[in-house]
Amino acid sequence: MGTIIKRLNITSGSWRTRHSALHLAVTAAQKCLQGAEQDPNDVDLLVNAGIYRERNLGEPALAALIQEDIGANVEDPHAGAHGTFSFDIANGTCGVLTALQVVDGFLRSHTVDCALIVASDVDPGHGMSEHFPFAPVGAALLCGRTGDGDGLGQFHWANLPDDGENFRATIGLGDARNVLRFNGSVKKEQQFATAAAEAAYGCLAKSALGLDEVDAIVAAPALAGYRTELATQLGVPVERITIAADEKIHTASLVAALDRCTGRFPAGAQVLLIVAGAGITAGAALYRQPLESSRQELNGLSAHQASGVLPFRPHSLCPHDRSTS
């Protein structure tokens, strides 16, 4: 039994929505559910992994607002009735993988049947940040459960504490308002890669697999230097590692990288997911492509067009990989 990704969606901000993390997350969630022909009321669990939002608001939990706007059981559940549990997770670029691990626990325990992960980041608004480095992008992952060994497998996390030396975001008072500021080091990408490689090797050891048995590597953040250094530390060609096309995507980066691989690998393919971010925190997980997507392809529909189960083809370059190396 495992957790499978049934569908994913990436949404970019327009000039009207570039300052609304809520709007981006809601739009991505709605398109993801519509594409999977899933009723919002079927969502048992909604997890928001986004970090930066309008006006630097910390409360209420953005997940609760997203739940209300997509119409997922917005009324208080009655006795014996179905409800939706929603909450935020704050773990930067690693947030989506953290959410996947949390969702996996709920699904494996049969506590829920359907889970939705969302992430989005925006510049909080005029005068509320200094040199905001991230693109306004939203993402959504719809997850379900399979009865066999497909889907998510082992997770492994690594920490290399650096007291925020390599990347730090802080909010402090400036001009009578809260201002978001960023600091980073030139060694950030190298340090992220070191932690990411440790997490990857730990995940493979838990799974009793070697890198030669992995069909694809999907990584975040989408930094070219990080990708190159990670390839060096893993001892693989850089072309084997897929990252998002836009290096400015933050919490949605892993989903954007997965989106570039949609339709490229068959059932049974082993995909290694690797993330790294501030802390330094890094994580890795294995994902085995479900059989169901291949059945749909044999019937003349890609998995992305049908149920949305994420399909893969082993050892193939994802679109545009040559341009990002």
Image: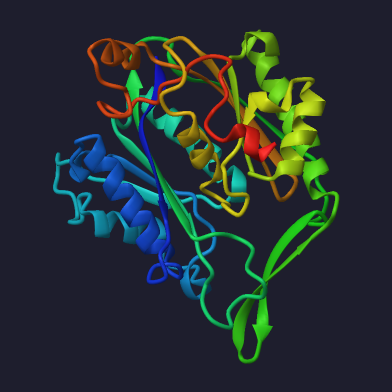
In x, y percent, where is residue 244? Answer: 57, 41
- Please state which of residues 192 and 162 is positioned toward the viewer in this rendering: 192
Q: Is residue 112 left or right of residue 185?
A: left
Residue 267 shows in this picture: yes
Q: Is residue 8 left or right of residue 235?
A: left
Name above or below for residue 121 compared with residue 318: below
In x, y percent, where is residue 108? Answer: 40, 23
Residue 219 figure quarter? top right
Q: Is residue 39 left or right of residue 206?
A: left
- Write the residue at 25% across / 54% down: 70
Render colour scheme = rainbow
In x, y percent, where is residue 1? Answer: 39, 14
Q: Residue furthest bottom?
A: 176
In x, y percent, where is residue 118? Answer: 41, 48
- Write the residue at 14% across / 48% down: 78
- Please state which of residues 239 and 186 is positioned toward the viewer in this rendering: 239
Residue 299 figure quarter? top left
Count of number-bearing discs: 0
Residue 61 shows in this picture: no
Q: Quadrant of the C terminus?
A: top right
Q: Is residue 253 left or right of residue 301?
A: right
- Write the residue at 69% across / 45% down: 223
Residue 18 figure quarter? bottom left
- Write the residue at 50% across / 68% down: 58
